[in-house]
Image: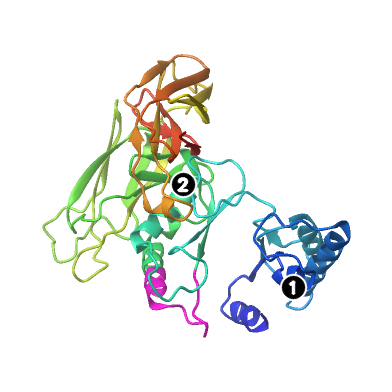
Amino acid sequence: MKEFVEGARKAGLAVGIYYSPEDFKFLYDNKIVVKRGGVKLTPQQRSAYVDLIRKQTNELFTQYGNVDVFFIDGAPKEECMDEAWKLQPNVVITRGAIHSPEQTVPGAIIDRLWESNLTMGTQWQYKPTNDEMKSGTRLIEILVETRAKGGNLLLNVGPKPDGIIADPEERRLTELSAWNFINHEAIENVRPWIVCNENNLWFTASKDKKTVYAVITGIPDWAKGARKDFVLGSIKATPQTKISVLGQNDKVVEYANNIDATSRFTQKENGLQISVVRAQRIYNNNKWPNPITVKLENVEPAFIPPVFETVAANIAGGTVTLKGKILNMGDAKELKVCFEWRLYGGFVENLYDTKWNRTEQINPQSAVGDFSQDFLKAEKGKTYEFRAVVIHPSGVIMTGEKMQFRSK
């Protein structure tokens, strides 16, 4: 621990400590079956257990200097937080004090502190063989989605027993680093925009919402020098609007001086039309499969977004009824509503899948209140994810938080 703390400080990094109050030795010493969850302790055992947790927390916060970040994975959290804050009031406690979904990203913008915790592969520790690793591109997409929804991303690396980061993970960190070198402006010190995305374009914004970053994902074969056009329904230009692409100067496409690299925009009734060229030559083979970021300065929201939520799935007989609710219409007189669904891939596997299916029925909604649809395609004994979908008159499609149901 001391070597880690000293090494982190020497590298100019904040010191973060993960701590699990679960103590298998305590269970073994007290002749309790060692297992995860469902452990029953007598009042005397509980008191001794809490005392152990406080002593271990005290050690972490008195033996290694200032601790910047603390992650509490397991119970009891309350006594652990109390001891940590008593000794170092300025420590930032993530899990234990804020919402910290694991191996998933929330389905919608969350207006409170939260952090997603996920692995590059399928496990937290070093796994020498047969791990299914997320690609560098997928990890970048997850980072972008997390920031677009207002969260922090805690990405795991499982070092080998000698402390070395294994090559597959190192290569992915390098790819993330290369992307972040160019696009960090869209990731650091930003806030969510009025919507988190329009299809494959994900948005972050400056604190004053006058600068918006549109991160274009899902185009792995965008050739160097090629121009592509997009329409943004949630962003409106002003007389002072400027457009650029991060990592290029809008003047040059290397070795192709005949190509016009200028970024352009036009405000039309159906939205802000942007036209940009990929001029970056990051790899010598001219291929770059990762997202491109368009910076839009001095813009404003094109509409006031509605507020809605995914509510529940009611199962009666062979019919599943999906329910949502409009809480605020925003500036729309009418909204269209439906649902999206997919088979649940699994606790770890759900982040490998980005595809959703949409219900065929799309209903108009002219006032706040509940809406629902019957879902008739559920296979027996399967777990499904679903989310409410609202379509604004501008054409912008917004999705709610993800929920699950298991068909009978």
The percent position of residue 349, horizontal first and vertical second, equals: 42, 54
Please give left or right for residue 39 compared with residue 219 in the image: right
Which residue is label 2 attached to?
A: 148
Residue at the location (78% across, 73% down)? 29
- Looking at the picture, the colour scheme in use is rainbow
Specify whether residue 212 is in view: no
Residue at the location (72% across, 57% down)? 39
The percent position of residue 292, horizontal first and vertical second, equals: 31, 54
Examine the rendered structure and indicate whether residue 284 appears above or below residue 98.
below
Segment tinted magenta in the rendering: 157-174
Specify whether residue 90 is in view: yes
Q: Secondary structure at mark 2?
A: helix
Numbered circles on residues, count = 2
Q: Secondary structure at mark 1?
A: helix
Q: CA distance from mark 2 to mark 1?
A: 34 Å
Mark toward the start of the polypeptide (2 vs 1):
1
Q: Nearer the viewer, residue 117 or 297?
A: 117
Whether the magenta-drawn stretch holds residue 333 is answered as no
Examine the rendered structure and indicate whether residue 318 appears above or below residue 112.
above
The percent position of residue 219, horizontal first and vertical second, equals: 25, 51
Quick one: label 1, few (<14), some, or many (20+) residues within 10 Å?
some
> In the picture, residue 366 is in which quadrant?
top left
Specify the amino acid type for callout 2: Ala
Which residue is label 1 attached to?
A: 60
The mark lying in front, picked from 2 and 1, is: 1
Specify the amino acid type for callout 1: Leu
The percent position of residue 351, horizontal first and vertical second, equals: 42, 52
Q: Nearer the viewer, residue 76 or 207?
A: 76
